[in-house]
Amino acid sequence: MPLTPLDIVNKEFKHGFRGYNEDDVNEFLDEIVRDYEALIRENDELKENTSGMTERLEQYRKLEATLQNTLIIAQQTSEEVKTAARKEAELIVREAEAKAEEIVRRAEAKVRDAESQLAQIRYETEKYRAQVRSLLESQLRLLSEEPMALQASRD
């Protein structure tokens, strides 16, 4: 069992022949008691501080664990967001490519329609020209035959 200041104060020494000066011994014991009490108080304060520091250390460890978990979650979320963004970008690109292909198909169909219409117009134009030429040629023949027919009927 540890020595207490009360043990020091109550300690009695036997008197011997030509022993130590009792006042010096009592004065020294009083000094020891004061120092010992101060050491005990300091030790108690250090224990309290240590207890407080241990609690704070535990709080910091919990905070560190929470921060590490938060960091891991943030990294996972970041990766998920990146993956989702890549997928969305790929989807947008595919949709844009599909729209572009549709636009090209429509444009090609319009070109084919325009070419078909142009061919039809050229055919109609040539047909019309042939009809006009035929009409003009028949009219010219009539014009050139009529004076001869008139002359033949006069003769």
Image (cartoon, helix red, strand yellow):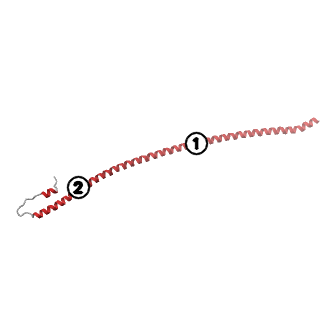
Secondary element under disc 1, as helix, strand or loop, is helix
How many labels sit on residues? 2
User: Which residue is found at the position 66% from the left and 40% from the top?
Assistant: 113
| Type of amino acid at the residue the image marks with label 2 | Asp
What label sits on residue 44 in the rendered view? Answer: 2
Q: Quadrant of the C terminus?
A: top right
Q: Quadrant of residue 49?
A: bottom left
Instruction: Characterize the local packing of mark 2: few (<14), some (14-19) or many (20 or more) Cα atoms within 10 angstroms.
Output: few
Q: Quadrant of residue 135?
A: top right
Percent across and percent down for residue 29 are: 14, 61
Q: Is residue 99 left or right of residue 114?
A: left
Which numbered disc, 2 or 1, marks the residue closer to the eye?
2
Vertical position of residue 27 compared to residue 142: above or below: below
Between 126 and 117, the residue placed more toward the observer is: 117
- How far apart marks 2 and 1 lie (CA) works out to 84 Å
Between 49 and 76, the residue placed more toward the observer is: 49
What label sits on residue 3 in the rendered view? Answer: none
User: Which residue is found at the position 90% from the left and 37% from the top?
Assistant: 148
Secondary element under disc 2, as helix, strand or loop, is helix
| Type of amino acid at the residue the image marks with label 1 | Glu
Vertical position of residue 55 compared to residue 113: above or below: below
Percent across and percent down for residue 43 are: 22, 56
Residue behind mark 1: 101
